[in-house]
Image: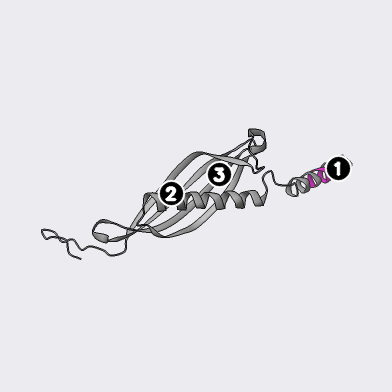
Amino acid sequence: MRYLSLILIVFVMWWTWAVVHSPAVISQAEHERIQTELKQVINNYITTHLPTAKNIHFDQFWTKTLNRHTIRASFSYTFDDAGVNNQVVRIGINGYAILDHKANSAATGTATNADVWSLDKLNVTNDRYMFLNGTLVKPGAAPTK
């Protein structure tokens, strides 16, 4: 019985070592490429739809492999926008995107061999607004700056 326990412990130790040191399903370089491209997509969207937006800053951005063909990209970013009466508003958005791996472009007939990830789901989990120049409102009086 002692020998069986010893063999079992050695097997479990070998198995955990193999799991920890196994290669990643999706490479670190692929995660970095996805993060960079998704940041560019978000940046382009903001500058296109909000031309007065400036100071776009990504506070946090990370990706996580859900399975062999799916990645979850979580993000948190802020930007400044001129609101009503040119009052500057800092807008912060938190959320995540689910990306699904499609067949590489060689299989679809295009010239490049880069992997193709489609944006299947985009979810904003939290948004916040901070007015940088506050307005004082008193009961029964007009707002003052």
Q: Residue 19 in the image: x percent, y percent?
A: 74, 45
Residue labelled with disc 1: 7
Residues at circles 3 and 2 in contact by the CB criterion of under 8 Å:
no
Q: How many marks?
A: 3
Between 22 and 98, which is closer to the camera in this rendering? Answer: 98
Q: Earlier in the sequence, mark 3 or mark 1?
A: 1
- The residue segment tinted magenta is 9-13
Residue name at image x 68 percent, y 48 percent:
27
Q: Amino acid at mark 2?
A: Tyr
Q: Amino acid at mark 1?
A: Ile
Q: Residue 123 in the image: x percent, y percent?
A: 45, 42
Residues at circles 3 and 1 in contact by the CB criterion of under 8 Å:
no
Residue name at image x 46 percent, y 47 percent:
95
Residue placed furthest toward the left: 140
Residue labelled with disc 2: 45
Q: Nearer the viewer, mark 1 or mark 2?
A: 2
Tell me if 134 is positioned left or right of 127 in this view: left
Tell me if 37 is positioned left or right of 112 in this view: left
Residue name at image x 82 percent, y 43 percent:
11
Residue labelled with disc 3: 72
Between 46 and 6, which is closer to the camera in this rendering? Answer: 46
